[in-house]
Amino acid sequence: MQINTRFGAQEVDPASIINFPLGLAGFEHLHEFKLFHEEGKPTVFFLQSVQDPDVQFPVVNPDAYQVSYECVLSDDEAATLQLDDPADIAVLVTLAQGGDRDHGVHANFMGPILLNTGKRVGLQKHLNQVSGSVVIRAE
């Protein structure tokens, strides 16, 4: 299968597709996604719908920026992720450009995307609050 991405046409191995049984917030009807990144720059990924290639989200692993981030899963969430081993879970957060007054990039810690990397199943968790604080300094 081939899909058009922001990096040009890409060949997609069906075994690399991540299934989101519940979809993502606002896109509950889309269930198949693929992660892409610019060659040589595997820091920011793009989670792109296989069903609707116009739908894509920039995502990062908070660990790559020394942000310690944990969340607790309910039994239903663990079942959706087909979770056998917590070490199989990767956590991603979506990025968004700031508004007119704020030209920075914002990470959405309230809606992390959890991936079971072994079974290629994903879930977006919706948090009501985040405990603690996150400070990122650029040097």
Image (cartoon, rainbow, N blue to C red):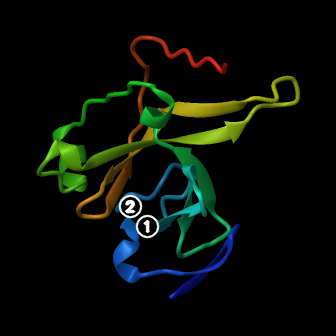
Which mark identifies residue 13? none
Residue 112 lies left or right of residue 80; in this view the side is right
Residue 135, given in percent of the width and then of the height, sits at 55, 15
Mark 1 touches mark 2? (CB < 8 Å): yes
Q: Residues within 10 Å of mark 1 (few under 14, many from 20)?
A: some
Using the rendered view, name the quadrant where residue 91 is placed: top left
Task: Give residue 69's position: percent from left, percent from top.
Answer: 38, 27
What secondary structure is found at the residue carrying circle 1?
Answer: loop
Residue at position x 66%, y 21% in the image: 138
Tell which residue pokes out farthest to the right in this image. Answer: 100
The CA distance from mark 1 to mark 2 is: 5 Å
Residue in the foreground of this view, choosing between 25 and 33: 33
Tag 1 residue = 31
Q: Residue furthest left?
A: 84
User: SS of the residue at dot 2?
Assistant: loop
Q: Residue at left 25%, top 45%?
A: 77
Residue type at numbered disc 1: His
Q: Residue at x 88, y 30 (%)?
A: 100
The x and y percentages for residue 106 are 65, 31
In the rendered view, would you say 64 is above or below 129?
below
Is residue 15 depicted above or below 113 in this figure?
below
Q: Which mark is residue 20?
A: 2
